[in-house]
Image (cartoon, coloured by chain):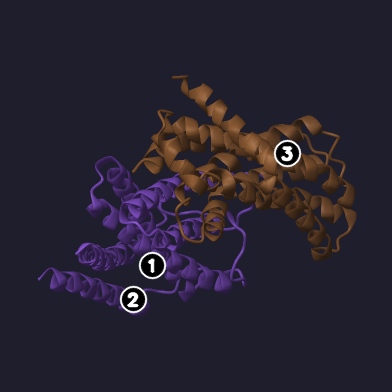
Amino acid sequence: MKSGLGTALAIARKDLRTELRTKESINAAASFALVILVIFSFAFNLERDEFYAISGGLLWLVYSFAGALIVNRAFSRELPNDCLDVLIASPAPGWAIFLGKAVAAFLLLLLVEAISLPVFGLFYNIRWTESLGSLVLIILLATWGMTIVGSAFSAVIVNVRLRELMLPVLLYPILIPLLIAAMGGTTALFQGEPLTGENFGYIRQLIGFDAVYTALALYMIEFILVF
Amino acid sequence: MREKATYALGILGAIVMIWNLHHIFTQMAPEAAQGMAGWILFIHVPADFMGDILYTIALVTSILFLVKKDFTYDSISVACIEVGTMFILVNLVTGSIWGKNQWGIWWTWDLRLTTQLMKFLLYLGYLVVRPAIAEATQRATMSAFIAIFAYADVPLVMMAIRLPNVRTQHPSPVIETGGINSVAVPFVVGIIAQLLMALALMLVRLHQENTRREIDSLRRELHAL
């Protein structure tokens, strides 16, 4: 039997391959992100400077909407043909199954974000390439936090009626500390401020959120998958 | 007998609360800066304490359920969270009334207000999702999981609201600075009154939950026949 990490990677690979062959959730999430981006243009009629002040918030709203669509599929993908039962019955440890699914969701969401970021910059005339390194850091940290919590809740509600409705009800309140930091940090970057001094708090908050929930989810997932 | 004791506790709590309000309105001078509106704090602050206490109990019993798989712990968790959420709602509503009186607005995206609203929404999610899970063991396990995740979020929200893009205008707590001394008696009595009421409500809810579980198992037995 392979090590837990090897199993996790195998599951991530399997999920990614399934998704890239069918393109079920990625097509839905990417086109949904685009639609939301267009709708925002009708919601606000702002001066350039005012728009910069809310730009980070808009971007993360789009990402979190798309994220909910992606993580929803993480475990419900296994429902047809009772694949989930087989996965749980296999000798793979619960945390490895979960980690594999979270990694796959993370990469898929990153792909959707990579598609929608240039469109966002183009539509709203945002200079997002100027501090690309810091922006990528924020995106990586916040996306990981989003997918680890999202995948955990995807496992929790996989057998629930109306799970597509229930996931956002659980997910968004938990994500608020993460979104506050991601939105604040991204807005600061778009306005040309560096992520040092007071603004470094955003990065610290994101790291703290990721650490707490990664540990909690990996530890507790065993209880959720096997009961 | 148990039922009567529960109601007695609740009634006692109500009497203490009414006595306390009577004392505040007849014996105490209006607060210097805020007038009578300031005394809403005797409802507002204890309600927050009750919410936090009940959520903490729910955290402990949720962990205990996952470890011991004893459904009593699950019943206590759901009873605590339901009653706790009600107290947090009381805290939000009284705070809002005070805010309208003092700041001229019902709501502002202030640090403490935001934390409180987040707490409310997190546990509201718990209460909404719980009934949607049909199987009893599954429901209890998932609920415990959600309760633990929600509790872990509260310190993170508190950290997040110190970030530069969040501002505050809520008065600082005076308990730490000793400013509470002049109003200590009605304040403590207010806490005792709400503690009694919280306990009574929790016991009622616990009793309901146990009855529901009994009915469930009877129904299953009937199906098996």
Mark 3 → mark 2, Cα distance in angstroms: 59 Å
Residue A66 spot, x, y in % from top left: 68, 50
Q: Residue furthest left?
A: B1
Residue at image mark 1 = B42
Q: Colour of chain A?
A: brown
Residue A171 spot, x, y in % from top left: 54, 51
Residue at 26% across, 51% down: B73
Q: Nearer the viewer, residue A40 or B153?
A: A40
The amino acid type found where label 2 is placed reads: Leu
Of labels 3 and 2, the one closer to you: 3
Label 2 SS: helix
Same subunit, tags 1 and 2: yes
Q: Nearer the viewer, residue B18 or A5?
A: A5
Counting residues from the N terminus, which is met first, the one under dot 1 or under dot 2?
Answer: 2
Q: Chain for mark 3?
A: A
Q: Are marks 1 and 2 in contact (CB under 8 Å)?
A: yes
The reply, left or right, for residue B43 in relation to residue B115 is left
Residue at image mark 2 = B21
Residue at 33% across, 53% down: B140
Q: Say the numbered circle drawn on residue A111.
A: 3
Mark 1 → mark 2, Cα distance in angstroms: 9 Å
Mark 3 → mark 1, Cα distance in angstroms: 52 Å
| Chain corresponding to purple in the figure | B
One can see residue A201 in this view: no
The amino acid type found where label 3 is placed reads: Leu
Label 1 SS: helix
